[in-house]
Amino acid sequence: MGATPISPWQEPFRGGYPDPRAIGLSGLESLRAAVSGRGVRPPISHLVGMTLTEVDEGYAVFEMPASGWFLSSQDQISAGALMMLADGSLGCAVLTGLASATPYTTAELSMSFLKPCASSGTIRAVGRLLHIDPPLALSDVWVEDGRGERVAHGTSTCMVLPPLEGIDHPGELPRVDSPAYETPDPYERAPIGEPIPWEEWRSMSGVDILARQITGELPQPPIHYLTGMTLREASEGSVAFTMPASEWLTSPLRTVQGGAIAMLAHAAFATAVTSTLEPGSAYRPVDVKVNFLRPVFPDGKDLVARGIVTHRGRTMVATATGSTMILAERPPVA
């Protein structure tokens, strides 16, 4: 029996961050430089393949392949993967409207899911700036799958911070070429892991399936091996996940991307719903809303997300809430 391949998130991260002098550019100038390939790609781009492809005033488009790495245990493209892509477009749409040396941060991300995303082709997120009047900025995004069908819609509220003083325009920054790597980026490789077969869902309750997944009797999905997101606890109506605050998940701001945090939160409360399912049942996520309280830095420590079902009915199957916390001064969970 061969050794299990190392998970991508356990490898040294790839990519880098903008030249610090780029803060002297307007938001639109910095994004146009990124589209033209004048800077290095951030780590999260190397991990999942999300790339800024179009930008104009009040408009930003990200694309990424519908990689098999994004499959969940239910054999669907994870809603969390869509949130990572959407967060890029939402934030950059706001950035197009900001003057030089003007920081901003995402305060709220809300997504509604319209239909399952096709598991082939290219996923596209088209973000628009709706309103900007510091300290608030609003943006929205449509997510389209490889068939060109809209599969999700999202909105974001950003806080625009006071401009930094004493920052000069840097002029034309030198082109920085991304380094060459000996192996393909993680999203380009053959996925590790697999969804749970339908026969198991048909014969066991949700909580029994989750318990067997924790013990290793049932497989982990590819998204687990890509990001390190792991189900740790499960009882009926309540679950807990962990995910390392890895540098692989960082955006050009050098912090863990908000969409990645939202992915973890969504996994917790969606799986809490899974824990209530009877054999042969299924569910589809409808919406998610995440409020961000502070940045998460890539220190390798575990983020912990707990999801709890607060209501379960017949038509609207369940409503769940979740929370995510950082366990400070503790080593990552093994």
Image: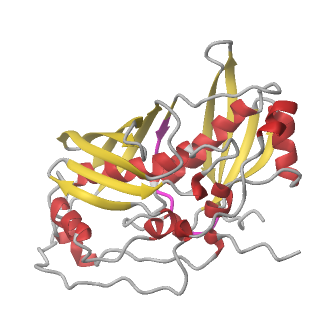
Residue 231: % across, % down: 74, 49
Is residue 169 within the magenta segment? no
Q: Tell me the residue at 53%/36% (across/down).
A: 116
User: Mostly what secondary structure, the magenta segment?
Assistant: loop
328, above or below 237, in the image = below
The image's colouring method is: secondary structure
Left or right: 175 as drawn, with respect to 311: left
188, above or below 271, in the image = below
Q: Quadrant of residue 64?
A: bottom left
Q: Which quarter shows the N terminus?
A: bottom right
Left or right: 136 as drawn, with respect to 193: left
Left or right: 50 as drawn, with respect to 303: left
Left or right: 271 as drawn, with respect to 227: right
Is residue 294 within the magenta segment? yes
Residue 279: % across, % down: 83, 27
Foreground pick, 132 / 30: 30
**Residue 186 visible in this rendered orientation of the protein:** yes
Foreground pick, 34 / 106: 34
54, above or below 263, in the image = below
Residue 43: % across, % down: 46, 70
Find the magenta span and give its range: 289-301
Residue 210: % across, % down: 81, 42
Q: Tell me the residue at 78%/65% (across/down).
A: 334
10, above or below 213, in the image = below
**Residue 161 visible in this rendered orientation of the protein:** no
